[in-house]
Amino acid sequence: MNRTTIAFCLGAAALAIILGALGFQYIGGIPPCEMCHWQRWPHIAAAAVGLGGSFLIRMGLVERRADRVIAWLAAILIATSGVIGVYHAGVEWHFWPGPQACTGPAFHYTGGALDLNAPVVMCDVAAWRLFGLSLAGYNALLSFAIAGCGMFLLTRRRRTV
């Protein structure tokens, strides 16, 4: 498999993860917290780099030798989302403290005309779990698996026949 194809596959996988997260949000009714958004940004960047970069190479607008950098960057961005997912899952399990903006006791405003008591999605409370893992945990597992496969394919030596 050539590096342009690897970059494309990494970008497509990152896009699939983003679409899955949006599906949980808009179809499943599970609103994201602040740290959930943090995990989405590297996937969005990886999708743009992987899909956009491979498209530009195939159109001849970018030199083919840039495929290595594009593929590695997409893999690193996906792995970055996995690292954030591990941090978020640890916050949900209370292994370590999370950001004060979205963890701990919820803030309730009791004065004035504004209704500031809209539900706040807390980062230290998992909105959904399957087999004990939250969406942050599944994002970490998927991200590391996808990035690992991409990195493995990028580092293996090509056989000449």
Image: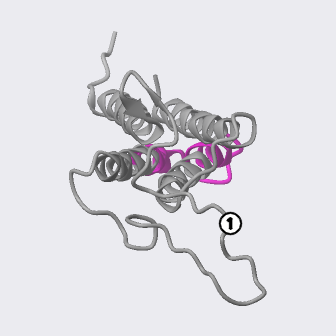
Is the residue 51 above or below the residue 100 in the image? above
- Residue located beneath label 1 in the image: 118
Q: Nearer the viewer, residue 48 or 58?
A: 48
Q: Quadrant of the rendered structure where residue 51 is?
A: top right
Q: Position of residue 71 (x, y in %)?
A: 45, 43
Name the quarter where the C terminus is drawn: top left
Q: Quadrant of the rendered structure where residue 105 is?
A: bottom left
Q: Nearer the viewer, residue 115 or 50?
A: 115
Q: Quadrant of the rendered structure where residue 50 is?
A: top right
Queried whether the magenta region covers residue 69, the answer comes back as yes
Indicate left or right for 109 with 149 as reference: right
Indicate left or right for 8 with 147 as reference: right
Extreme top residue here?
161
Q: Nearer the viewer, residue 71 or 16?
A: 16
Q: Amino acid at mark 1?
A: Ala
Q: In what element is the residue under mark 1?
A: loop
Queried whether the magenta region covers residue 28, the answer comes back as no
Extreme bottom residue here?
112
The residue sitting at 41% across, 43% down in the picture is 75
The residue sitting at 56% across, 57% down in the picture is 121
Q: Nearer the viewer, residue 87 or 99?
A: 99
The residue sitting at 33% across, 35% down in the picture is 151
Q: Is residue 82 visible?
A: yes
The residue sitting at 51% across, 35% down in the picture is 128
Indicate left or right for 24 with 129 as reference: right
Q: Position of residue 67 (x, y in %)?
A: 48, 44
Is the residue 104 above or below the residue 146 in the image? below
Query: Label 1: few (<14), some or many (≥20) within 10 Å?
Result: few
Is the residue 147 above or below the residue 34 in the image? above
What span is colored magenta in the figure?
Answer: 50-72
